[in-house]
Image (cartoon, rainbow, N blue to C red):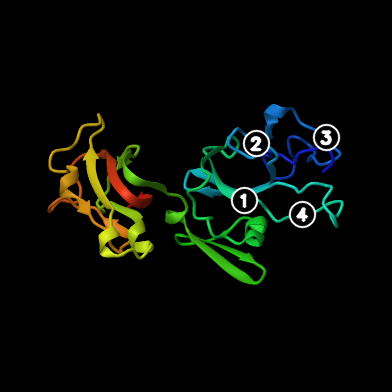
């Protein structure tokens, strides 16, 4: 748009009828203050524009699919006055309240191979069990909620979860051993996952050390955590420390 970068602002409503701000904003305004706009940051391309954010409520937090765009120069031949696409990129954004958003998954998300036309048309999905389903151009696309985001490190890494209240069910970790996914031969079949349990003070619980819960590269994607003959301690809540290499670490669940 002439002299205007397309950026988003969030409108809120208690009932879906009355909205604040009262008007959406476009090429002709009204323009909102910069602190109310979702604008590019230092890690974005300088001329990044944001098309739209499709937000999904997921078990106490919000995940938003942001579609990004960079327009081509106006001097290019055969350029129409109001060209659209192809879209530059899309990524998952995260929010605790649906208003303030963070961007921890610029690269590591389940959107990697999503077709551009689908990303642009993504709206509220249909939830079927653990799956999110979208209908676009006569096709149905699905995404498992447990595999939407992941932590990854090609070298050695570790992460510690927030406190997890325990139940009678064993803990499971959703993973992907990348050497297996890449179909590498045995000489390059590196990677591992180790898990240990910490008490509320951050101390390792005796009997639940990392060397007692070790997984090597395998086709399995849902690993049930077990330390010797024990699945869980008697604690009411624990933290899970996961040490891994060349593993996509998706989620922890019962």
Graded by Cα atoms within 10 Å as few (under 14), some (14 to 19) or many (20 or more), the crowding at tag 2 reads some
- Nearer the observer: mark 1 or 3; the answer is 1
Which residue bears the numbered disc 4?
Answer: 84
Percent x, y for residue 169? Answer: 26, 53
Question: Mark 3 falls on what kind of element?
Answer: loop
Graded by Cα atoms within 10 Å as few (under 14), some (14 to 19) or many (20 or more), the crowding at tag 4 reads few
Does residue 145 appear left or right of residue 53 in this picture? left
Judge whether residue 55 can be spotted in this image. Answer: no
Percent x, y for residue 185? Answer: 30, 65
Task: Give the CA separation, mark 3 to mark 4.
Answer: 22 Å
Does residue 193 appear left or right of residue 250 in this picture? left
Residue at the spot x=81%, y=41% of the render?
26
Which residue bears the numbered disc 2?
Answer: 40
Task: Give the CA separation, mark 1 to mark 3.
Answer: 27 Å
Please tell me the numbered disc located at residue 30: 3
- Nearer the observer: mark 3 or 2; the answer is 2
């Amino acid at each position: 748009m002439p002299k205007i970068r397309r950026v988003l602002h969030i409108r809120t409503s208690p009932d879906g009828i009355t909205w604040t701000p009262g008007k959406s904003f476009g090429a002709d305004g009204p323009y909102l203050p910069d602190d109310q706009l979702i604008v590019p940051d230092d890690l974005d391309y300088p001329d990044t524009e944001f098309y739209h954010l499709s937000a999904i409520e997921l078990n106490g937090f919000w995940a938003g699919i942001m579609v990004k765009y960079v327009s081509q120069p106006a001097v290019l031949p055969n350029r129409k006055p109001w060209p659209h696409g192809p879209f530059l990129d899309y990524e998952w954004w995260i929010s605790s309240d649906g208003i303030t958003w963070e961007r921890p998954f610029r690269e590591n998300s389940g959107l990697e191979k999503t077709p551009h036309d689908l990303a642009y048309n993504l709206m509220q999905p249909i939830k079927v069990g653990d799956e999110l389903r979208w209908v676009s151009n006569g096709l149905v696309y699905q995404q498992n909620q447990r595999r939407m985001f992941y932590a990854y490190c090609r070298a050695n890494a570790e992460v510690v979860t927030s406190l997890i209240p325990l139940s009678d069910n064993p803990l499971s970790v959703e993973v992907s051993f990348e050497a297996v996914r890449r179909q590498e031969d045995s000489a390059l079949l590196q990677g591992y996952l180790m898990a240990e349990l910490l008490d509320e003070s951050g101390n390792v619980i005796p009997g639940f050390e990392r060397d007692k819960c070790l997984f090597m590269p395998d086709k399995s994607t849902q690993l049930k955590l077990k330390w010797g003959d024990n699945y869980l301690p008697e604690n009411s809540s624990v933290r899970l420390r996961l040490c891994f290499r060349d593993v996509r670490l998706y989620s922890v669940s019962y």
